[in-house]
Image (cartoon, grey):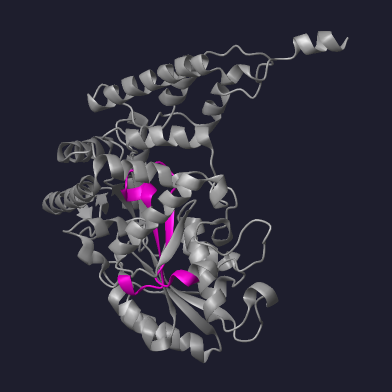
Amino acid sequence: MQSEAKSEMQDLSEPFNSEAFRKQGHQIIDILADYLDQITSKKLDQVLPAITPDEMLVNWSDDFPNKPGNDLAELAKKVISQSNHLHHSGYVGRQVSTPLPIAALSELMSSFLNNSSVVYEMGPVNTVMEKSIVNWMAKLIGFGSDSDGFLTSGGTLGNLTALLAAIHIKSGYDIWKDGIKDSNPISILVSEQAHYSIKQAIQIMGLGEDGIIPIPVDKIYSMDINALEIKYQEAVNSGRKVIAVVGSACTTKTGSYDPLNYIADFCEKYDLWFHVDGAHGASALISNKYKSLLKGIERADSVIWDAHKMLLMPALITAVIFRKGSNSYEAFAQKASYIFEKKWYNLAHRTMECTKTMMSLKLYMSLSMYGTDYFSNYVTKMYDLAEKFGQILEEVPDFDLAIKPQSNIICFRYITKGVPDINELQKQIRKNIHNKESFYIAKTRLKDKIYLRCIIINPLTTEYDLMNLLDTIRNSA
């Protein structure tokens, strides 16, 4: 009876057959290479398939087979056809990069090797690569040799980690051990245009909505320094303990850079922690033309920087970097000696994750293969193209530009006479464009006005594509 059951049981070593893997790998790479050729040769018209979530759900049954049977190539082609095509030159919608093919191959290596970064022995090479990546970024920021940091899974976790360190250091007592005290409630000063993850992090830390002190912005949606002083004094006079200011470099909605040098002066004046959310815009540091946008970032206590936004990496790779390296240990000041000692190469005690992927591998290999000049030229080109697009929008009578772009994020509206609701028109234009599938764009609200929003992040997008977009918008209206 036991021998019969054994004979019916599937051989667990079968999926690990090297020749079968080689064949499957060739299939997948061939399919992806054909897909890339379709996109770069302009043979693929579709960006985002016009299909509802419910319709999509019908295509993907939860009734999985008991035995092997599905065709790998067929499944792969189906996945690709129903995805958002981020390599398409009409993809100008979100802050998610068009990943380099070499980075995708590195991702394959990462998933196959599955080394984590909990302790050095579980991921020796990626741990050292991670240290080198952080050192490279820290130098670009302008931090000294005593800086330190790590990589984590996304800007949301990055901001939370940095602010946890801030509250631990600046609260004046051991929050990790004793919890938050009721007297002198803690607050953090944040631009009203800051990414939602900042507010989310503050509330996760238990500071509540009152722990967020929103700072008004000026006409270009950068933090208003005069308002910063006023809001700080109001908070202190009401009995709140302000511990930090968060600067945006740049904001998500408009791509505006906060005046980092002025914020640094303010933080020094009142002994506050200075955190910079550079998730999107810190990559301008590698552009000789645009790095001045970040003047003052070298004075920050902590910085986050996403490689999966403006460094052409697959998600997720976020660096959390501290000017004073010892502060990188403060966010999670717990004792877990069975896992690690306090060494730079044992990373788990400094991040939210225990097990995390070999995220350093993708960026390290890409920098090594293409060189830093490639990435510098990429950032410069994207910012230049946004500036040019802004000039075009200013010159045509039927479009309204929100502000001149500081980065590669640009907000504008289509305007025409005889339309009672211009806001509703922008929503309808976006819907019509997506139904045509030729472009993918976003929208945002600024001062009660709806704007179409583009992020020029795809290195395959050209000025011709953007002119085409304007014609498509006109036709969709």
Residue 172, above or below 313: below
Identified at 36% across, 59% down, the residue is 135
Q: Is residue 110 left or right of residue 31?
A: right
Identified at 53% across, 41% down, the residue is 115
The N terminus: image quadrant: top right
Q: Is residue 403 left or right of residue 433?
A: left
Check the image and name the residue furthest to the left. 395
Residue 324 at x, y percent in the picture? 42, 73
Viewer-nearest residue: 260 or 131 = 131
Q: How many marks?
A: 0
Residue 282: quarter of image? bottom left
Residue 85 at x, y percent in the picture? 36, 32
Residue 398 in view (yes/no): no
Q: Is residue 439 magenta?
A: no
Check the image and name the residue furthest to the bottom. 237
Identified at 55% across, 67% down, the residue is 331
Residue 54 at x, y percent in the picture? 55, 30
Identified at 45% across, 33% down, the residue is 109
Residue 263, above or below 361: below
Q: Is residue 318 magenta?
A: yes
Residue 299 in view (yes/no): yes
Query: Magenta part of the protein: which range?
Result: 298-326
Residue 407 at x, y percent in the picture? 25, 56
The C terminus: image quadrant: top left
Viewer-nearest residue: 447 or 65 = 65
